[in-house]
Image: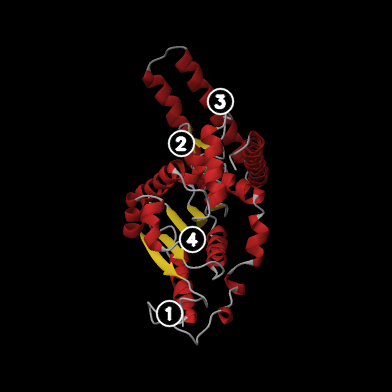
Amino acid sequence: MPLENIQYDAIMREYGRRQLLSRHRLEEHRAHAQERIPRLKEIQDAIASASAQQIHSLLGGEKAGSTAVYREKVEALARERTQLLTENGFPPDYLEAAYECPACRDTGYVNGQKCTCFHKLAADQFRQQYSLDQILERENFALFSFSCYSDKIKDDNTGKTPLEHAQFAVEKAREFIGHFGEAGQNLFIYGDTGVGKTFLSHCIAHEILKKAYSVLYFPAYDLFGLLAKETFGKKDGGDALGHILNCDLLIIDDLGTELTNTFVSSQLFQIINERILHDRSTVISSNLALETFPELYSTRTFSRIIQNYKFINLIGEDIRIR
Ligand SMILES: [Zn+2]
């Protein structure tokens, strides 16, 4: 789903709420500290008046030298304030505004660009829309069951049982989660329908969300449908592609179930390539036979995946296994 205006408004309201909260917190701190240390009130007033004088002198065109006097005065007062605070057992930054995101000071933007926290809030919005929260409650590692995988039969190609494949898959997924955020890592989970690929990708989403990263999860069909709507539709204001390229973790589930065409193929390349270039992690699950991939999408996409993704093969009991 593109970020509709209504969601954009909800995000900006959230920033408003955060700013208000930090202002309240600062006022509470101020009142509390000034009650204990009355001198702090005088310092606050003196800083306000020196700052005002500095602005006046700047507006009045006074030379840089005279504004420096005021600046030094403010700095000396601030030093005294910090000293008083620490002497009285307060943290030195007790009277500074505490933002939830210091990078953008809870405005959502840094130098006109969306802050990482904005993408995280946008991902929250997407998640609510897909009811992913409820799904993740049901599908996580605590509920992952190895008993669904046989240890009696062996795969022709690997000589391993479905259980061994599943154990390897969970181990790789846990490694992925453990190292998340250190560098871009990518997983390509493949296998037939009904062997647990989606379940495993939900488990991964669940753990990464718990680490407070932004995660976007899309069934492939929805992902390309959304991008087509944004590209060919008349609607503007959406920035779905921006969020898809910028979120910390992108999960594309069931690649191969969408209608493939040149648009899909070029979008997929752009998404995979850009995310690799910017060290952002992607998890793709697919029930395609790997050898059909280059033909269905493109050789350049497939070679990017081969070079940059770890492959996890999940298998179940099907006709190819004896
Ligand atoms: Zn921010």
Mark 3 belongs to which amino acid? Ser
| The disc label shown at residue 285, or none | 4
Q: Earlier in the sequence, mark 2 or mark 4?
A: 2
Q: Are marks 2 and 3 in contact (CB under 8 Å)?
A: no
Can you say which quadrant of the picture contains the N terminus?
Answer: top right
Q: Is residue 99 visible?
A: no
Residue under pointer 2 = 76
User: Nearest the camera: 126 or 165?
Assistant: 165
The residues tagged by marks 3 and 4 sit, at their Cα atoms, a distance apart of 62 Å
Which residue is disc 3 drawn over?
49
- Judge by depth and name the residue closer to the eye, 52 or 264: 264
Q: Which mark is residue 13?
A: none
Which one is in front in this view, the residue at disc 2 or the one at disc 1? Answer: 1
Residue 38: where, in percent of width, then height? 64, 41
The Cα atoms of the two marked residues, 4 and 1, are separated by 20 Å
N-terminal label among 3 and 4: 3
Q: Secondary structure at mark 4?
A: strand
Q: Looking at the image, can residue 119 be seen?
A: yes
Is ligand 1 closer than 8 angstroms to the Cβ of mark 1? Answer: no
